[in-house]
Image (cartoon, rainbow, N blue to C red):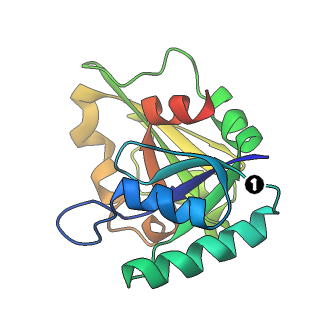
């Protein structure tokens, strides 16, 4: 089965650096096949006959050992990633006029009620939930009014990993 591992909080700033070539080799050492990484933000695509829970445990253990810091990881099946991405309106883009992001959710906050609890100004943010993720679109000129910048300080931020719509669509293809 094809899986996508989404690593949270790596390669942002100078700390918590993870080399993608090394990450690929680590996944191959775990016995996963057809391993590839996509951009530097911690997206690993691979195949395995193991269950998602077994895969997640193995990945978390080896990453802690290899990098000497804990890396939160979500593992999604190809089908789950496609279902999330297919829910995003086709006309939502990342360009000069608009911004579209996806927050893949850890189980602690994976609930439809998250839409009401995020600190966004929904007058300026079009926000949607689907099992496993929330996604939003804003007109770039309204970014300041959207309160998207409040997400980082919110109690929910540590339970999600963000990707832009271009990355989400690539992972689903």
Seen in the image, is 124 located left or right of residue 135? left
Q: Residue 119, how many percent across, how many down?
A: 41, 57
Q: Give 9 or 89, whichever is nearer the viewer.
A: 9
- What residue occupies the far top of the structure in this picture? 91
* Number of marks: 1
In the image, residue 43 sits, relative to residue 91, either above or below, namely below
Task: Determine whether 65 is above or below 158 in the image.
Answer: below
- Splitting the image into 4 quarters, where does residue 93 fall? top left
Q: How far across and down, in percent of the image, does residue 162 sit?
A: 44, 50
Q: Residue at x 57, y 76 (%)?
A: 60
Q: Is residue 39 left or right of residue 72?
A: left
Residue at position x 56%, y 16% in the image: 90
Q: Residues within 10 Å of mark 1 (few under 14, many from 20)?
A: some
Could you tell me if residue 144 is visible in this image?
Answer: yes
Q: Position of residue 68 (x, y in %)?
A: 38, 85
Please indicate, yes or no, whether residue 126 appears anywhere in the rendered image: no
Find the residue positioned furthest to the left: 14
Residue indicated by mark 1: 48
Asked where in the image residue 99 lies, by quadrant, the reply is: top left
Look at 26% across and 28% down and name the residue there.
Answer: 140
């Amino acid at each position: 089965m094809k899986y996508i591992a989404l690593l949270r909080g790596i390669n942002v700033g100078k700390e918590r650096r993870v080399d993608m070539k090394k990450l690929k080799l680590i996944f191959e050492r775990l016995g996963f096949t057809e391993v590839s990484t996509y951009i530097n933000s911690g997206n690993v695509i691979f195949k395995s006959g193991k269950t998602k829970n077994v895969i997640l445990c193995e990945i978390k253990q080896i990453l802690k050992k290899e990098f000497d810091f804990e890396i939160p990881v979500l593992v999604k099946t190809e089908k789950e990633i496609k279902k999330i991405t297919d829910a995003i309106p086709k006309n939502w883009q990342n360009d000069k006029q608009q911004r579209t992001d996806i927050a893949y959710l850890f189980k602690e906050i994976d609930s439809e009620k998250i839409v009401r609890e995020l600190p966004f100004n929904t007058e300026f943010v079009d926000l949607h939930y689907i099992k496993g993720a929330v996604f939003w679109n804003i007109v770039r000129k309204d970014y300041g009014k959207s309160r998207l910048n409040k997400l980082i300080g919110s109690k929910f931020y540590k339970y999600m990993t963000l990707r832009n719509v271009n990355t989400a669509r690539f992972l689903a293809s």
